[in-house]
Amino acid sequence: MNSVQYADQIFVLLKQWLVSLFPAPLQTAVGILITVVTIICVFPALFAVTTILERKGLGRIQNRYGPNRVGPFGIFQPIADGVKALTKEDLVPANADKIVHFLAPVMLVIIVFLAYAVLPMGRNMAAVNMDCGLLFFFAIGSATEVAVFMAGWSSRNKYALLGAMRAIAQMISYEIPLMLSAVAAIMIAGTLNLQQIVEQQAGYSGILPHWYVFTPWGLAAFLLFIISATAESNRSPFDLPEGESEIIAGYYIEYSGFKFALFFLGEYLGMFSISAIAITLFLGGWSAPFSFLAWIPSYLCFFGKLVAMICCFIWVRGTLPRLRQDQLMNFAWKFMLPMSLFVIASAVCWRYAESWQRWALSLVVVAVPYLWLGHGMMNNRKLEQRVYRYAE
Amino acid sequence: MLAGGILKGLAVTARNFFESFVSKERLTTVQYPDERLPQIEATRDFPFLVYDGPDAMAGLRCVSCQICEKECPPKCIFIEKSTDRKPDAAGKLQFYPAKFNIDISVCMSCQICVEVCPFDAIKMDVEFELATDDRFGGLLLDKQKLAKSNEYYHRIHPTEANTVDGKLAAARAKVAAAAQPKPQVAAPAVAGSEVKA
């Protein structure tokens, strides 16, 4: 092992050494414990960093400073937020279903953390190397809808219920293109094991990596995946379930104090995990972006890509206004779903055609439906001055 | 192009983001407790009582006529008229407010009290940092807290204060001229009505 490999595997070796300190019967349990504790520490820390990054980033996008009072440049703002959330009064509505009301945020966070079990965060760095890792991820991920609906139902509040129903409708609609666009990557990789999917993309031609996003079908699938992921994690422009200006935070409405903080945490952790899956499927997971950068430790590549994805999410949030419910559903069922089916067809072309023909074929199979469906969505409507018939 | 609008929007926000670090004109935020915008002269929020001379309680212009108390739409002014008379800043015997309270949690800053006052005794203040942890007592301002000097009035509303001073001086001169042969009786009421006219 040379020094580059040591740097790459340092956490793996550290864990092995820690485990070897314990007697043999305990070693399995200790190994699991170490991994779990690491994940539970690292990702909430990333959440704290993300909150300040988001608030400052959105501020700059809107030509404001953002939080700059707590500590130098406001970098200790997450600590102040945490103290505030912990010391706030925890209100439960008199008519609420108290047990379900309490369980909803807990369940959301537990479910979201479970999904982290299969994420490959570096070479040999996944909590569980599961053969059906992607399937496990989607199975766990779809359970978050239950937590959201528990929150909406138990609050006994019409806005909470509206928000929860919007969330369910949106999550179910967008889960289909999410999974179908992942299917394209699975078809090419030929495996559901996330470690193997990454390893298949870890090669280089010249200096460029073999990431799936650099193929026509891969780019289309990646974009579809990211759009669906935004909708899945209820982020702007798909934040209708919260809809602060219409249904006053939706299913969060009756939550305060630390329960609200847990929801917030769960939502961000969900965003991280789904971004991590997007990175794994299309952006080469922990592999370096260029062959001459291969000496960078794999976990740094992974977290660098994750932070880049988070920044993109923040950027999109600062740019796009919220969709209307009918626009949301039209987009899911009339554009995303057919496009993801065409992406699968495009992946088939890529799999069976040769040399330049695979590029041409898979490009055509994606681009033509994109233009066709896109113009169909636009329905020959042009952006023009709105005319009010009665208001003026 | 399809989705071209989204890319255009992303370009705009990216430009906002990066330019806010280089160009100060983009950041219009005033970091309030550390830096403040200059006061606009017409600013007003809650009323205060003007006094002349060095002693605040002795120099109050208010003669406790209670017009403002009656005119106040939300009824936030409470005045208790004195039973005796005291010499005012000009040396004349006048009634004075034994109690003058304004509940600024009720006040709606309409300025009607200022408009009806015949003695230019009540004016609008610009002090806005009135936050308190005592929401009843802390927002009920009494005579001592309301009294502010004419110099302070000049400082916050210079143009208006100069006009008022000119009017008062003219009225006093007129009263003094008219009262030359007679002893001074009912002078304040005459002075007041002339000021309004």
Image (cartoon, rainbow, N blue to C red):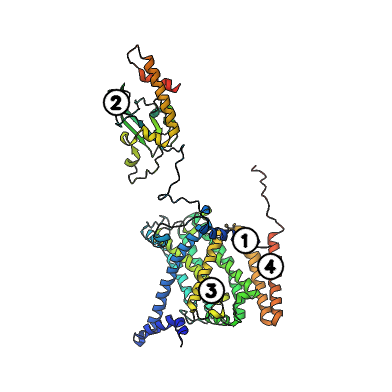
Q: On what subunit does the disc labeled 1 rest? A: B
Dot 3 lies on which element? helix
* Residue at the image point whose x is 59% and y is 61% from the top: B10
Q: On what subunit does the disc labeled 4 rest? A: A
Estimate how packed mark 2 is, as few (under 14), some (14 to 19) or many (20 or more) residues with alpha carbons within 10 Å: some
- Are the numbered discs 3 and 2 placed on the same chain, yes or no? no
The three-letter amino acid code for the residue at tag 2 is: Ser
- Are the numbered discs 3 and 4 placed on the same chain, yes or no? yes
The three-letter amino acid code for the residue at tag 4 is: Tyr
Of circles 4 and 1, the one toward us is 1
Dot 4 lies on which element? helix
Residue A262, by quadrant, is bottom left
Disc 3 from disc 4: Cα separation: 24 Å
Q: Quadrant of the N terminus of chain B?
A: bottom right
Outermost left residue: B84
- In the picture of the structure, the residue carrying the numbered disc 3 is A277
The three-letter amino acid code for the residue at tag 1 is: Ile
